[in-house]
Image (tube, rainbow, N blue to C red):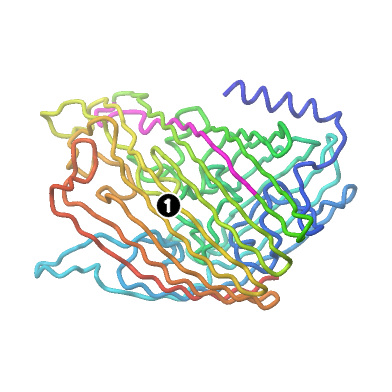
Amino acid sequence: MKFIFTTIILIISFNTFSQSQDTLNYKRHKKAKDFFSLQDTDTIRERHSVTTASDQFPDKKKRWDLSWSGLVSQDLFWDTRKPTESRDGGIYLYPADVFYDKNGKDINGYGSFNFVAMNTRLNLKIQAPDALGAKISGMIEGWFMGISNTDINGFALRHALIKIDWKSTQLLLGQTWHPLFTERMFAYTVAGSAGAPFQPFARVPQVRVTQKIAKSNYILVYLNAQRDVMTFGTNGASTEYLRQSMMPEMGIQYIFDSQKQDKKNSSTHNIYAGLGFNFKRIVPRLMTADTVATRKGLNSYSGIAFFHYEHLINKQLKTGFKLKAAFIQNCYEYLMIGGYAIKEYDENTTLDFKNNYDYTNLNTLSFWGDLYLNYRSWEVGLFAGYCKNLGAFSPIQSSENRLSYYTRVVNADFMYRLSLRLKYTANKLQFCLEPEYTSVIYGTSLTRKGKVDIAEPTHWVHNLRVLVSTVLYF
């Protein structure tokens, strides 16, 4: 950690004397775009539903400039089975497990619907005068999803960041997408979950440095805390478990970003790919149930790999696909299945919170892909996702006891999703349709390492969500 902080300070000092310009930007259809910006589609839903730290004022260097934007959104959806969700269904994850009544009827086997407008957002982009030999910009964005299920329709912070751009270095400070989310690798789904729970999904306060090391090659390093979604523990979901470790979550990524233009037919080929490694340490409690001090912690290691290819055939037609794989330990705060558990200390005794026990990670493996085609005002796309509960590497104390686990769902073996989408854009108005089919295998018994025991009965449940969305951008 000291090495990362030292590196950041040296970078700032070195670049203070360098010429102020932004070579992290590249040009697409003669419009300057930031290294982390989205596609040049101002009226496409994904540009607004997944905000990035893009530089909105590439040609203005000396003066202040403010730019207001946002969207008004209404989502209408129907489910064939009770969903696991938050914000009245505005954030949907997967279908709920079976829950039988005394007559053997599945209470969760009934459908529902809802209409929500909470995805409405307001965004302010800020261009400040140059400083420290760099271009300075910022962004603030909020929405009406609230900060929790008890604050629905409340106005809550999504993004608040400062961006400092030198010749080949970018420093980002503030709250925005977790680097494991990979801003330019989100799925173009209509649903605002953008591929969750099949991909890490969280916004966090952070310090992020992106360094260009060669043409089309970048290294990204970061430190982050928690805010929107937090680790789960003895006191519920809280930031305290990470904070008590006295060590920010941290990681490093290698990114390859290439654009080649075919002069014969004026088409463009874009490739965006990379690898990432993430480290996190938590201290779940400071004392046992016997009021004895403890500092037992848990180290978690995660990795991602991603690839995006896009072909801009002409001004009216583009197509492409995205692929991403992730191995994540202790991923509750990323809206994925998984978390951690109490490590076995005595196979022959029951769980006792008076013990000064250790912890073990629950491991999750996920894959997803997104295929899309845009023609004029139309977009059609297909999303597919899969994730698997790998259990723990060490035995879990009283593995059949749900109190031994701190996880989003204990008994899911694996799940997958298929969703087909259709979008039509008329200037600043967009209409979207997305049927989304999600299937989960739930188990009735767990092994000593927290995996679903497939030798015991399992429940295979399914949900079809039909989502109709209308968005007005401004």
Task: Give the extent of the magenta segment.
Answer: 271-291
Say whether residue 191 is left or right of residue 215: left
Say whether residue 124 is left or right of residue 149: right
Asked if 325 appears above or below 157 in the picture, the reply is above
Residue 254 image-quadrant placement = top right
Instruction: Give coordinates of residue 128: x percent, y percent.
Output: 82, 48
Amino acid carrying label 1: it is: Phe
Q: Residue at x 33, y 67 (%)?
A: 463
Q: Residue at x 80, y 42 (%)?
A: 22
Outermost residue toward the front in this view: 264
Residue position for label 1: 198
Instruction: Give coordinates of residue 18: x percent, y percent.
Output: 85, 31
Asked if 70 appears above or below 449 in the picture, the reply is below
In which quadrant is the C terminus drawn? bottom right
Q: Is residue 17 magenta?
A: no
How packed is label 1: few (under 14 Cα within 10 Å), some, or many (20 or more)? many
Asked whether 159 or 260 is in front, the reply is: 260
In which quadrant is the N terminus drawn? top right
Instruction: Give coordinates of residue 465: x percent, y percent.
Output: 39, 70
